[in-house]
Amino acid sequence: MPVRNICCIGAGYVGGPTCSVIAYKCHDIKVTIVDLNQARIDAWNSDNLPIYEPGLDEIVFERRGKNLFFTTDVDGAIQEADLIFVSVNTPTKKSGMGAGMAADLAYVEGATRRIAEVAKSSKIVVEKSTVPCRTAQSMRTILEANSTPGIHFDICSNPEFLAEGTAIKDLLNPDRVLIGALQTPEGIAAQKALAEVYTHWVPADRVITTNLWSSELSKLAANALLAQRISSINALSAICEATGADVDEVAYACGRDSRIGSKFLKASVGFGGSCFQKDILNLVYLSEQLHLPEVAAYWKQVVIMNEYQKKRFVRHIISTLFNTITNKKIAVLGFAFKKDTGDTREAAAITLIKDFIQEHARVAVYDPKVDHEQIFRDLSEPGVIDTRKEVEKHVTICASAYEACHDADAVVLVTEWDEFRDTALDYQKVYDNMHKPAFLFDGRLILDAAKLRQIGFKVSVIGKNELAGTA
Ligand code: NAD
Ligand code: UDX
């Protein structure tokens, strides 16, 4: 039976855009996105959507109220649906067994129990959240143990590969859609029904079908492989600085080998975002649980290298500023974990600014999309008033890059927003208003260092040997 009514549990960065695109492409399907968070749902129903994603507004505004709905009536939407996406958060556990590594599955379990309790007809339940391998088995056990007799649940795994900032582009034109299911007649039928939703706009040969466990593991594997490339190029960036090699040239030369490929080889101040670190730690935990310590250590090194890269950058900034940044003004350009998003989860800027505060610097931050209150929240320990006060004493949030850089001793470029490029920002004006010597640290390799040196800046770029002060 073709799917006619979809419920998505979780109106976050994944559930919101993914199911809005389904509604946009499948006018014959009613899509209802639900969440427990009233404020989030209110924002989805307003002119000011809760997340910034290029192209999202147009899609939501076109379909909302037609075949796309946002509500907190979770039970009603579950009852109506023939297919339910579970797209809730799966953060790293903060306490208990596996704290700091394992995924917290409480939200997935909560949503699954709710489905079992309120469903009055059979459903296809789709795991959209990123979960440890074999979570579908736990979901099945919960659903079967709690459901009304006669009701049947099929479970599919359909991990999401969108990247923030390009979510709409990725969803409209995905490299692939992955659907895992039990290889039983019912499982295969559910897999086919879900595939038919996607083939409304995705070419059929891009829809990959696998068994459940391959699908679950592929999501963790894909993120681990992507993050590993960044840690690899960042590890090489340290060698570049020490030797005089240029990391962009090395990345280009290696990336031209078609076996290596050119993408995801941009050295940086370190990867951020809600997924990479969480999913690798999840993989590390899984490996440990499976008594595979060498495998766990191998993947853990990707995260260790990422932390090293951030610390290395901070150390270099401090040593360049004559070994002290006490009372110096540091302008931080960008706070989001990458450009074109307002998301700050695991953003490198958080680590950097916390270190600057520890060193008693005055920090001025500007980001075009991140909410001011979010910046303070990210920099303060949750619920600890003292750290909040300390942060407010040291950190000013500015309305423009020029304001942040005014009277600064150093500018640190952390997020690669286009408006920070030397073709967009007037660096002469920035320089004229800074203390001298005017230091500029490019953590994203987007600036033309030679051009900026001509203005008078002392420029350091990750992975270029001038960072070591030898050029
Ligand atoms: P998010 O925190 O933005 O959104 C999750 C939403 O689920 C929240 O609004 C929360 O209130 C809601 N929720 C939790 N329990 C609920 C329940 N029982 N009923 C109704 N609503 C409930 O998270 P996200 O970034 O959208 O990520 C969701 C999942 O997708 C995670 O597993 C994540 O790893 C994965 N993922 C994220 C990305 C990304 O770029 N953010 C990409 C791919 C996969
Ligand atoms: C990632 C995966 O790309 C996506 O497939 C998955 O569904 C969710 O996790 P996301 O975290 O949104 O997406 O963004 P991504 O573009 O992967 O960037 C992650 C981090 O790596 C950012 O901080 C980015 O700046 C950094 N990065 C990326 C680099 O430092 N160098 C690169 O070459 C690429």
Image (cartoon, grey):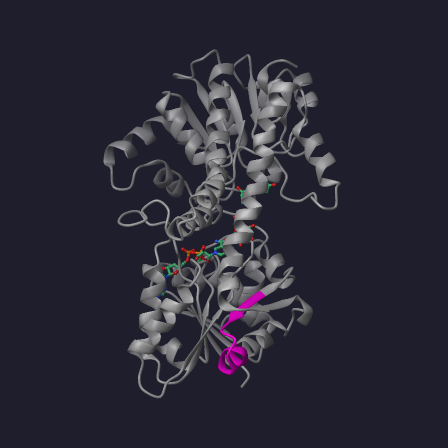
Left or right, residue 339 beside residue 347 = right
Residue range in magenta is 178-190
Q: Nearer the viewer, residue 357 or 245?
A: 245
Image height of 288 relative to 83, above or below: above
Give the residue at x 58% y 36%.
232
**Residue 307 colored in magenta in the image:** no
Frontmost residue, 14 versus 44: 14
- Name the residue nearer the viewer: 119 or 219: 219
Quadrant assignment, res 32: bottom left
Asked if residue 56 shows in the view, the reply is: yes
Q: Quadrant of residue 168?
A: bottom right
Residue 381 location, x and y as percent? Answer: 30, 38
Residue 186 % position (x, y): 49, 82
Q: Residue at x 42, y 14 (%)?
A: 324
Residue 336 visible at all:
no
Whether residue 34 is situated above or below residue 187 in the rendered picture: above
Which residue is depicted at the point 52% across and 41% down? 368
- 50, above or below 344, in the image: below
